[in-house]
């Protein structure tokens, strides 16, 4: 018998013993109360003592019946809770990847351009990719929070438009700009100005930005994060692409803490 089984059995037995003790104590309390009533009100006490409630055979049967029902209930098998699997692939069609595509480790970040913690983590993630020399890549996915909308969703769409017009490198350059302090991004005009600084066709950029071209992609990635029980930004998943092992890491952890997870997976 395994140690886990032994521990489980001992635990169950302890629970059953506790249940019997609780029932016995309850019976004692009941008898004590009836005795007290009998002492204070002899006429009432006499009737109680003459009733079936306190007759030996009946009382013993009721006690045993109560114990048997409790034990049976405790011995009923229970289904253990199954951990929810995260139904997320490391690389999906349309992903924006920073670093080597065939890296062993992928950092999947669900993020919000209006989140100050995401801005802090953005610099950490960049350093993490550079430090690990092709072993780690970074996938950015959108999770605009309701509290930051409509601007957060508009910025997510703007980054997607930049990637559509300029490719993967421009997507990341645009994201760097949104998280940096060099450019304002409070309005649609600010977002178009960033596109201009990056050399994009601003007329095409604006037309695509106000269209619904990337609505489904942004909304889909947001829902994906929600389905994976990610309830804040940045929501990070470190995944080993060879073994399938993953670890969910909420929040903007510092570089040293992120590196510890990477080292463990490598």
Image: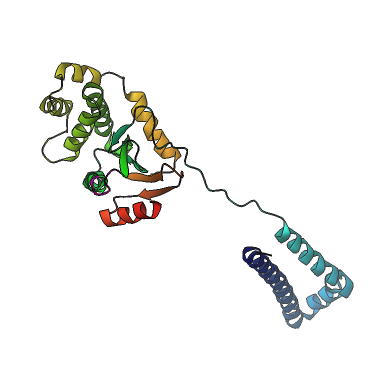
User: Residue 226, position in %: x, y?
Assistant: 42, 39
User: Residue 249, position in %: x, y?
Assistant: 37, 50
Nearer to us in this view, 69 or 175: 175
Do we see residue 45 in this rendering? yes
Do we see residue 233 in this rendering? no
Residue 195's quadrant in the figure?
Answer: top left
Residue at the (51%, 45%) spot, across then down: 84
Q: Decide whether the magenta segment is chiefly helix, strand or loop.
A: loop
Q: Quadrant of the N terminus?
A: bottom right
User: Residue 82, position in %: x, y?
Assistant: 57, 48
In the displayed structure, 141 sits above or below 260; it is above
Figure label count: 0
Residue at the (39%, 29%) spot, across then down: 220
> Does the magenta-highlighted stretch encompass residue 171?
no
Q: Is residue 34 left or right of residue 155?
A: right
Q: How is the image coloured?
A: rainbow
User: Residue 245, position in %: x, y?
Assistant: 45, 47
Q: Which region of the structure is painted magenta? A: 130-134
Residue at the extreme bottom of the image, as rendered: 39
In the displayed structure, 137 sits above or below 2; it is above
Residue at the (15%, 19%) spot, across then down: 201
Residue 61's quadrant in the figure?
Answer: bottom right
Q: Is residue 29 left or right of residue 87?
A: right
Nearer to us in this view, 34 or 116: 116
Residue 7's quadrant in the figure?
Answer: bottom right
Residue at the (61%, 52%) spot, across then down: 80
In the displayed structure, 85 sits above or below 55; it is above
């Amino acid at each position: 018998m395994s140690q886990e089984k032994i521990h489980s059995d001992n635990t169950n037995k302890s629970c059953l013993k506790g249940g019997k003790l609780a029932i016995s104590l309850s019976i004692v309390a009941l008898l004590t109360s009836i005795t007290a009533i009998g002492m204070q009100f002899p006429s009432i006490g006499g009737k109680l003592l003459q009733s079936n409630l306190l007759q030996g055979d009946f009382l013993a049967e009721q006690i045993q019946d109560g114990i048997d029902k409790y034990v049976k209930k405790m011995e009923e098998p229970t289904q253990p809770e199954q951990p929810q699997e995260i139904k997320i692939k490391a690389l999906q069609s349309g992903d924006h990847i920073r670093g080597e595509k065939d890296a062993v480790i992928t950092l999947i970040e669900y993020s919000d351009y209006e989140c100050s913690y995401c801005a802090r983590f953005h610099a950490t993630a960049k350093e993490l990719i550079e430090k690990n020399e092709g072993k780690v890549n970074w996938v950015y996915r959108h999770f605009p929070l309701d509290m930051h909308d409509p601007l957060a969703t508009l910025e997510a769409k703007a980054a997607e438009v930049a990637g559509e017009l300029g490719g993967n490198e421009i997507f990341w350059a645009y994201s760097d700009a949104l998280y940096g302090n060099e450019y304002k991004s409070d309005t649609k005009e600010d977002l178009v100005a960033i596109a201009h600084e990056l050399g994009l066709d601003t007329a095409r950029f604006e037309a695509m930005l106000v269209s619904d071209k990337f609505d489904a992609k942004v909304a889909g990635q947001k829902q994906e994060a929600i389905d994976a029980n990610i309830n804040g930004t940045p929501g990070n998943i470190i995944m080993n692409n060879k073994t399938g092992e993953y670890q969910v890491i909420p929040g903007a952890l510092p570089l040293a803490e992120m590196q510890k997870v990477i080292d463990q997976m490598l």
